[in-house]
Amino acid sequence: MIPHEEKLKEGHNEKRKVERKIIMKTKLTKIIMSSLAFACALVCLAVTMAPGTSATARAAADGQVCSVGTLKGLYLATLDGYANIGGNLVPKTIMEGKHFNGDGTFINTFGTVNIGGTTILNTGGFGGTYTVAADCTGTLSVPNGPSFNLYVGPGAQKIWFTQTAGGLGVGTATRLPGR
């Protein structure tokens, strides 16, 4: 072969190598994208199926079915958020001992509310009502006071709160042993 033909052949080989790399990258991209699409489809399917399952069935699948009787005993509750004072949101913190009676009522055995850096209220002796559905979600309300949505964790050892009226806040309550 003459040198000119060798250079043409080398150039043709390089071109074929580049084309092969492009084809391989394209195939790899298609495999990855189809795998991602399949994973997304599975997630979408799971998300659309979950709301169609009854609360009782979901709770039973988790091994936990709740009711107002699930909450019974003394819990230490803490909440951080903002109080609405004259249309202004002011930082607040709350720590309370909440005794749930197992019948949809509770009483605070002790408590302190701090709003804007000032302790303004001892909440011991105040109480209210609560609900708990089979799926372990519920509500808690204080007469002429704040309202909360709640979730009861496994074994009713912990409760999560988010305030829905009377300000903004999130918190938890942990069951105290032997109470």
Image: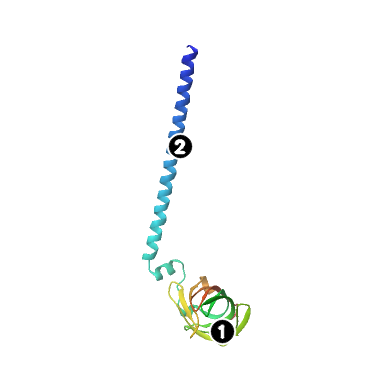
Using residue 114 as the reference point, say whether residue 156 is left or right of it.
left
Q: How is the image coloured?
A: rainbow
The structure residue drawn at horizontal position 45% and vertical position 39%, both measured from the top left corner, is 28
Q: Residue furthest top?
A: 2
Q: What element does badge 1 sit on?
A: strand
Q: Residues within 10 Å of mark 2 (few under 14, many from 20)?
A: few
User: Amino acid under label 1?
Assistant: Asn
Residue drawn at (37%, 61%), measured in percent from left and top? 49
Q: Secondary structure at mark 2?
A: helix
Location of mark 1 (residue): 108
Distance, label 1 to label 2, CA atoms, is 65 Å
Q: Position of residue 81 (x, y in %)?
A: 55, 73
Considering only vertical position in the picture, is 22 above or below 9?
Answer: below
Which tag, 1 or 2, sits closer to the chain's start?
2
Q: Amino acid at mark 2?
A: Lys
Residue at point 42%, 67% (across, down): 58
What x and y, as percent, mark residue 110?
60, 84
Q: Check disc 1: other Cα within 10 Å, few if <14, some if 14-19, many if 20+.
A: many
Residue 116's place in the image compared with 29, above or below, is below
Mark 1 vs mark 2: in front: 2
Question: Looking at the figure, which quarter contains the C terminus?
Answer: bottom right
- Location of residue 19 by image quarter: top left
Residue 161 placement (x, y as % from top left): 51, 74
Tag shown at residue 25: 2
Question: In the orientation shown, which residue stands out farthest toward the bottom?
Answer: 125
Q: Are marks 1 and 2 in contact (CB under 8 Å)?
A: no
Query: 92 and 25: which one is in front?
Result: 92
Query: Residue 69, position in %: x, y?
Result: 48, 80
